């Protein structure tokens, strides 16, 4: 599922890329959603998106590796294969 | 006096020149070994820009990029790199990504002891297959790898399938089993709200709104099942990772930054 190519999307992306993200995850939820959307299709990206939000709630060193980025601790979750 | 100072400056500059400093490659290797992959990649990029291409820098950069999940560039570069360790790293990259056909093609080019090491690593997910593959390793590698393999499988503490089934029966219970009270609570509350709303709206014969709430409920329900299984998988991976690293260091020292095993 490709996001619509419009000025609004372009502005959102430009602003999002420049502003430091407050998301606890690396890549951010929207970046992960876009990656999964491209790789696995829209429906699966939504399911995994919900799973990602729950992971964000759960996150601790029991489930993921932390790194320091922009002076904050972030949890790494690189989107894997589609299954 | 001026001449002495100038000579000293030239000497200092020469010794600090990374392009000629023999310690640069071991330092880069040490960064990879310390798992400082982003630092290793930046250092390798600087060296390649300032000093030109060198096979060992390219290889270490590719290992760092593979660890940083930037696979396409690293794989394309490894294919063009004609040093023995590059094939080992390439085979490892395919093996760990589950790309069996490509891994098989590259492994065929390696000498038998390295083939055995990579095939053992490829069989790591299955306890019996790994035990069988470990017996084909040369010398004292076999018992050490077998012992690490047993530790690796003993570190698996949760069943992703069971977590998924639990969450399907009662949303949130799979998360609780996996060890996250917060995710369990959020899953339970969200599913209760959306499923409850769907039922209430259907009872009130507001079918369009009920369908919308039901669609949202399905995302939270299925997303919850996926999350429960994912949390269990992650829990296992975090527990198994130190042993997997030891095993990798034993079987494929090149990917830990050791270029001449």
Image (cartoon, coloured by chain):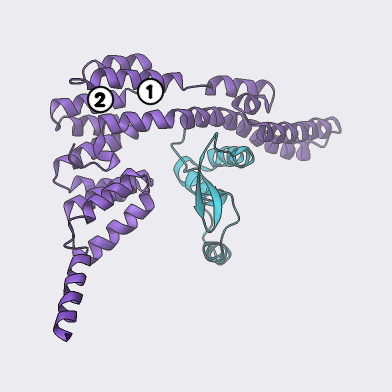
Chain colours: A cyan, B purple
- Evaluate if marks 2 and 1 touch, with contact meaning CB atoms under 8 Å apart: no
Which residue sits at x=54%, y=49%? A74
Identify the image quadrant of the N terminus of chain B. bottom left
Q: Secondary structure at mark 1?
A: loop
The 10 Å Cα crowd at callout 1, few under 14, some 14 to 19, many 20 or more, is few
Does A26 appear above or below B237? below
Whether residue B204 sits left or right of residue A26 in the image: it is right
In the rendered image, residue A62, in percent from the top left (x then y), is placed at 55, 34
Does B145 appear above or below B102? above
Q: Earlier in the sequence, mark 2 or mark 1?
A: 2
Please state which of residues B123 and B149 is positioned toward the viewer in this rendering: B149
The 10 Å Cα crowd at callout 2, few under 14, some 14 to 19, many 20 or more, is many
Residue matched to label 2: B119
Whether residue B84 sits left or right of residue B101 in the image: it is left
Looking at the image, the residue that sits furthest to the right is B204
Which residue sits at x=19%, y=63%? B19
Specify the label residue A27 is tagged with: none
Distance from the alpha carbon under mark 2 to that under mark 1: 12 Å
In the rendered image, residue B176, in percent from the top left (x then y), is placed at 65, 26
In the rendered image, residue B146, in percent from the top left (x then y), is placed at 31, 18
Residue matched to label 1: B125
The disc numbered 1 marks a residue on which chain? Answer: B
Q: Quadrant of residue B63?
A: top left
């Amino acid at each position: 599922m490709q996001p619509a190519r419009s000025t609004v999307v372009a502005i959102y992306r430009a602003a999002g890329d420049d502003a430091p993200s407050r998301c606890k995850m690396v890549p951010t939820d929207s970046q992960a959603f876009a990656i999964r959307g491209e790789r696995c299709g829209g429906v699966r990206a939504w399911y995994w998106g919900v799973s990602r939000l729950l992971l964000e709630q759960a996150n601790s060193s029991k489930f993921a590796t932390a790194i320091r980025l922009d002076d904050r601790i972030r949890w790494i979750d690189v989107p894997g294969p589609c299954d | 006096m001026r001449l002495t100072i100038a000579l000293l400056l030239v000497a200092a500059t020469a010794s600090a020149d990374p392009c000629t400093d023999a310690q640069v490659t071991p330092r880069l290797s040490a960064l990879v070994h310390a798992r400082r992959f982003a630092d290793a990649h930046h250092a390798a990029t600087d060296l390649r820009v300032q000093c030109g291409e060198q096979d060992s820098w390219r290889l270490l950069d590719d290992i760092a990029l593979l660890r940083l999940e930037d696979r396409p560039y690293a794989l394309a570069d490894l294919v063009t790199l004609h040093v023995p360790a590059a094939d080992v790293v390439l085979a490892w990259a395919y093996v760990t990504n589950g790309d069996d056909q490509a891994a098989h093609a590259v492994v065929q080019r390696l000498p038998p002891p390295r083939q055995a090491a990579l095939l053992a690593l490829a069989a790591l997910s299955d306890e019996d297959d790994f035990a069988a593959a470990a017996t084909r390793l040369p010398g004292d590698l076999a018992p050490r790898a077998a012992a690490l393999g047993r530790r690796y499988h003993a570190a698996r503490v949760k069943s992703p399938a069971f977590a998924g089934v639990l969450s399907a029966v009662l949303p949130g219970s799979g998360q609780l089993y996996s060890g996250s009270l917060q995710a369990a609570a959020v899953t339970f509350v969200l599913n209760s709200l959306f499923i409850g709303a769907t039922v209430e709206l259907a009872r009130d014969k507001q079918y369009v709104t009920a369908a919308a709430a039901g669609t949202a409920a399905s995302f939270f329900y299925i997303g919850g099942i996926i999350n429960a299984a994912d949390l269990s998988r992650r829990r296992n991976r975090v527990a198994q990772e130190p042993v997997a690293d030891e095993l990798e260091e034993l079987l494929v020292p090149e990917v830990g930054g050791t270029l001449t095993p």
